[in-house]
Image (cartoon, helix red, strand yellow):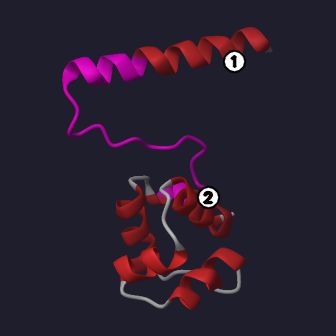
């Protein structure tokens, strides 16, 4: 699950394995190993990935179902808009069931 999340989030950010490796001070083959499930990042790199990807370590490790969105640099109005959008999606999913 961690391997899939690293790859999925990296791709969503439009980042190559080489770019991610550079940001973390690693080789591309290290990132490839993580994404293929051949190796697992150390605790230090899980924390670095979470910061870089703007998600929680719990999310990366599959401990929590929901993703975390960092809203620290948003205005109150922007946060309100995001909450409204999220609630619209929740209502739509409830109605689909």
Q: Quadrant of residue 33?
A: bottom right
Q: Secondary structure at mark 1?
A: helix
Q: Quadrant of the C terminus?
A: top right
Q: Quadrant of the N terminus?
A: bottom right
Considering only order in the chain, which callout, 2 or 1, is on the residue closer to the N terminus?
2
Q: Camera-side residue: 29 or 16? A: 16
Residue 25 within the segment the image draws in magenta: no
Picture coordinates of residue 68 (x, y %)?
44, 43
Mark in front: 1 vs 2: 2
**Disc 1 residue crowd, few under 14, some 14–19, many 20+, Cα 10 Å:** few
Q: Distance between the Cα atoms at labels 1 and 2?
A: 23 Å
Q: Which mark is residue 93?
A: 1
Which residue lies at the image location 40% right of the left edge and 20% below the top edge? 83
Question: Which residue corresponds to mark 2?
Answer: 8
Picture coordinates of residue 75 (x, y %)?
19, 26
Which residue lies at the image location 61% right of the left edge and 58% below the top edge? 8
Picture coordinates of residue 72 (x, y %)?
23, 40
Q: In screen coordinates, is 27 left or right of 65?
A: left
Picture coordinates of residue 92 (x, y %)?
66, 12
Q: In screen coordinates, is 30 left or right of 46?
A: right
Q: Which mark is residue 7?
A: none
Q: Camera-side residue: 94 or 28? A: 28
Residue 78 within the segment the image draws in magenta: yes
Q: Which residues are magenta?
A: 58-83
């Amino acid at each position: 699950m961690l391997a899939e999340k690293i790859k999925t989030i990296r791709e969503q950010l439009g980042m190559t394995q080489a770019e991610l490796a550079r940001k973390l001070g690693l080789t591309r083959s290290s990132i490839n190993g993580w994404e293929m499930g051949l190796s697992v990042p150390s605790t230090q790199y899980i924390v670095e990935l979470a910061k870089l990807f703007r998600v929680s370590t719990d999310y990366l490790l599959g401990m929590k179902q929901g993703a975390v969105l960092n809203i620290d640099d948003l205005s109150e109005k922007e946060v309100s808009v995001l909450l409204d959008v999220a609630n619209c999606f929740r209502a739509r999913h409830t109605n689909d069931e």
